[in-house]
Image (cartoon, rainbow, N blue to C red):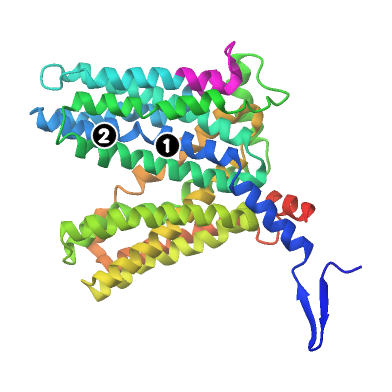
Amino acid sequence: MGSKSSISTGSGSVRQPSMNSIDRRQSILKIIFSSRMLVALLMGFSCGLPLLLTISVLQAWMKEEGVDLTVIGMMALVGLPYTLKFLWAPFLDRFTLPFLGRRRGWLLIAQITLMAAIVGLGRTNPANSPWMVAFAAFLVTFFSASQDIVVDAYRREDLSDEELGLGSSLYVNGYRVGMLLASGGGLIMADYMPFSMVYLIMAACLLPGIVTTLLAPEPETPAGTPKNLRGAVLDPLVEYFSRTGALWILAFVLLYKVGDTMASAMTIPFYLDIGFSKSEIGAVVKLFGFWATIAGSLIGGILMIRLGINRSLWIFGFLQAASTAGFALLARVGYSIPLLSSVIAFENLSSGMGTAAYVAFMASITNKKFTATQYALLTSLMGVPRVLASAPTGFLAKNVGWEIFFISCALIAIPGMLLLLKFAAWHHPDPEIIEITSQS
């Protein structure tokens, strides 16, 4: 009996939707509206909220208090825990607290101490004690980075392979909403109340994350987890580098978004240089662009359920490169609000999709025995191009011109795309596709 059904009519037969396609749609809808997706979103919000409290909001407070610009600039060093979090991630893989389980126990501790650190930062005095401010801000970034470690591990262990793409995109979107609340909301509130009150309110905004931690289920602990600290440090590295193509994957992590990163580093000077006002940049690039990025992440997450992570990396990577080339078109045309809006919409949509696939891919290649350590290493490595590749962008733009600069950024994406041939060939079915097909 065939998988299609039809109803005979006077004019012929009308083909009805197959049960396979109906089951597939129901499976996808079940994933989208599952409680695990809500957990991923709320945990992303909790991770994104603290980030800018030690950057833009703190800089505004210190500037208002008359702190020297040199000291304000040095405050960037308090963000080191985000880069070095792989150093204590093995500790969180190795030890389990006597409450809430291997992941949620550490997550609750990280969130409570983070709330306390944010409140403490708000009670400091930047004008009289800038070094006490630095110490409090360092505690915020340390506990925030610790929360990131555990949330990343929880998401990988809680979600199945077919859910990982959408779950990662919702995490990223929650992260961005948290950043927006902290930076935009925090600075707006600071016009109407003291910064100490702003930090107190931001600390209270972490309460939904704590409630989520208490109510969410604990992922199943896989067999073979580290039995001692030495194993927690060395076994993740030994396991990863014993894989075929391990170095190619590391190269891919470094190169996949390098062109997009380089282009983004110089967009504000570019907009100003071709005649856009700061208000136009704020309205189109920041506000409109934010929602375009959110939409891109959601679309990317949903598409990954159907396409799988590997094929999504191919498609979204090409879209990323094409959108970067769109800036070259804007450089040629010059001042044009409609074209700027179109370029920003395309670039932020494709960047959101690419980031969702990128984050899901990194989660998918971690071994659940050492999720915290391996994912922390990969995300630390992910930050390297943001610093090293962005550094020479001003020199390049100055010497080759905006149009050639953005074309070069688009072409730089090619090596990262070619590396996909080594471990994510288009014809190789992803686990997500296999699982969905087996259900249909």
Of residues 170 and 315, the one drawn nearer to the viewer in this rendering: 170
Q: Residue at x 46, y 38 (%)?
A: 381
**Mark on residue 55?**
2
| Residue 257 shown left or right of residue 52 in the figure | right
Q: Nearer the viewer, residue 366 or 210?
A: 210
Q: Amino acid at mark 2?
A: Ile
Q: Position of residue 179 (x, y in %)?
A: 34, 39
Element type where label 1 sits in the image: helix
Name the residue at the bottom extreme.
11
Left of 107 or right of it: where is 73? left
Marks 1/2: CA–CA distance: 17 Å
- Of the 4 image quadrants, the one containing the C terminus is bottom right
Residue of label 1: 45
Give the answer, above or below, for where 236 lies relative to 418: above
Q: Quadrant of residue 369?
A: top right
- Residue 165 is situated, as x and y percent measured from the top left of the image, at 58, 48
- Near mark 1 (Cα within 10 A), the count class, few <14, some 14-19 or many ≥20, is many
